[in-house]
Amino acid sequence: MFVVGNGGSWANSGHIVNDLVSVGIRAFCCDPATLTAFANDYGYEKAFGRWLSIVADHGDVLIALSGSGNSKNISYACRIAKVHFMTIIGITGAYEPHPKLAQQAHHVIRRGKDMQEAEDYQLIWGHQIMRALRYVRPERPKQPS
């Protein structure tokens, strides 16, 4: 499972990845060193997409966070995700009339009347995904010390 976002949405992606790892799901967000290296070499608009083209496998999941839903690098990442037959979950604000992310994602969550609310809902839905996965995949028994 991969999570991408910009600015506050990037910070939320790290939070969501941490929560998913805590329920036993392998999840990744692009670290600053990798992100800036790819942005330097391929341009910022293609940085997340380039990363996915290297590490993603058929059937993986991409959670794409974008307050506006129109971030070019998030849109490009979704295009690459489709090439890899990934499932795309888009979490975006409801204040843009026709966000690209809503057209690209297989499952779209649109909430929030401004950027701040959109980013709040990203974390709320991230927590809901984590809780749902916890019930699907029960916690492992503790290993003796």
Image: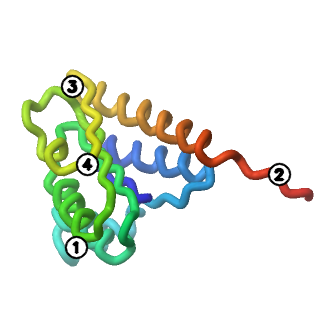
Instruction: Identify the image quadrant of residue 116.
Output: top left
Q: Mark 4, residues whose alpha carbon is within 10 Å: few (<14), some, or many (≥20)?
A: few
What residue do we see at 18% from left, 42% from top? 102
In the image, residue 135 lies at what x, y percent? 61, 39
Mark 3 vs mark 4, CA separation in Å: 23 Å
Q: Which mark is residue 40?
A: 1
Q: Amino acid at mark 2?
A: Lys
Mark 3 vs mark 2, CA separation in Å: 43 Å
Q: Nearer the viewer, mark 3 or mark 2?
A: 2
Question: Which residue occupies the extreme right position in the image?
Answer: 145
For label 3, the residue is 114
The mark that comes first in sequence, 4 or 1, is 1
The mark that comes first in sequence, 2 or 1, is 1
For label 2, the residue is 142
Q: Nearer the viewer, mark 3 or mark 1?
A: 3
Q: Nearer the viewer, mark 3 or mark 4?
A: 4
Horizontal side of residue 134 vs 116, given as left or right: right
Q: Amino acid at mark 3?
A: Asp
Q: Is residue 45 above or below residue 103?
A: below
Identify the image quadrant of the C terminus: bottom right
For label 4, the residue is 106
Q: Nearer the viewer, mark 2 or mark 1?
A: 2
In the image, residue 8 lies at what x, y percent? 33, 41
Mark 3 vs mark 1, CA separation in Å: 31 Å
Horizontal side of residue 61 vs 39, given as left or right: right
What residue do we see at 49% from left, 58% from top? 27
Identify the image quadrant of the N terminus: bottom left
Horizontal side of residue 39 vs 11, given as left or right: left
Is label 4 in contact with label 2 (beta carbons under 8 Å)? no
